Amino acid sequence: FGKMADGMHEEDPFGQYLTQDGAVEHHAPAPDDSGTADITALVNSSLRQEQLLSKICTVLMNLDDKIGRLASAQEHLEARIEQLAANAGSGGGGGVGPARPQANSGSRGSMVKPPGASFSGAPSAGA
């Protein structure tokens, strides 16, 4: 396991970044600076933070818009499903709904007569 850790340490790009001369010189303030480098770094950091927060706010606003459109589409879909269910329940769906009872006879009650049967209870001549 120790050999693996040594091999991983040699390939670490962050370690190489820290050992570069430019990285150390870039972040080290000059001794006769009198704090201007610190203030400049603070201002730059503040600007980057403001840019990041602005991007986050933009992403959140776009996400809110998309969620609003999704909720609206879902409401329209639910209304359409309810409308289709109401039409199918009332028989207005073009034969999709349940069959309506035929004329009422005393012996059959309100049941729907099967195809080919007569109201008298006797089978039709074709059957």
Image (tube, rainbow, N blue to C red):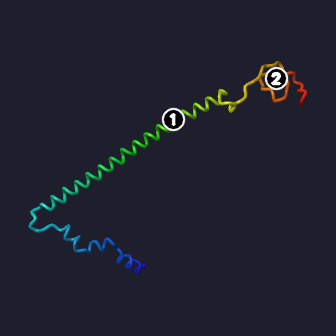
Disc 2 to disc 1, C-alpha distance: 43 Å
Give coordinates of residue 26: x percent, y percent.
20, 68
Number of numbered markers: 2
Give coordinates of residue 18: x percent, y percent.
27, 72
Q: Is residue 113 above or below residue 51?
A: above
- The residue that appears at 68% across and 33% down in the rendered structure is 96
Q: Quadrant of the C terminus?
A: top right
Give coordinates of residue 90: x percent, y percent.
65, 26
Q: Is residue 107 above or below residue 64?
A: above
Give coordinates of residue 101: x percent, y percent.
75, 24
Instruction: Label 1, secondary structure: give it.
Output: helix
Q: Residues within 10 Å of mark 1 (few under 14, many from 20)?
A: few
Q: Is residue 18 above or below residue 49?
A: below
From the viewer's perspective, tell me whether residue 27 is left or right of residue 17: left
Depth check, front residue: 47 or 106: 47
Depth check, front residue: 31 or 54: 54
Q: Label 2 sits on what residue type?
A: Arg
- The residue that appears at 88% across and 27% down in the rendered structure is 124
Depth check, front residue: 126 or 64: 126
- The residue that appears at 13% across and 68% down in the rendered structure is 30
From the viewer's perspective, tell me whether residue 22 is left or right of residue 98: left
Q: Which quadrant would residue 110 be assigned to in this image?
A: top right
Q: Quadrant of the N terminus?
A: bottom left
Q: Label 1 sits on what residue type?
A: His
From the viewer's perspective, tell me whether residue 123 is left or right of residue 91: right
Q: Which residue is mark 2?
A: 108
Instruction: Label 2, secondary structure: give it.
Output: loop
Q: Which residue is mark 1?
A: 76
Q: Which quadrant would residue 106 be assigned to in this image?
A: top right
Q: Could you tell me if the residues under marks 2 and 1 are in contact, i.e. CB atoms within 8 Å?
A: no
Q: Residues within 10 Å of mark 2 (few under 14, many from 20)?
A: few
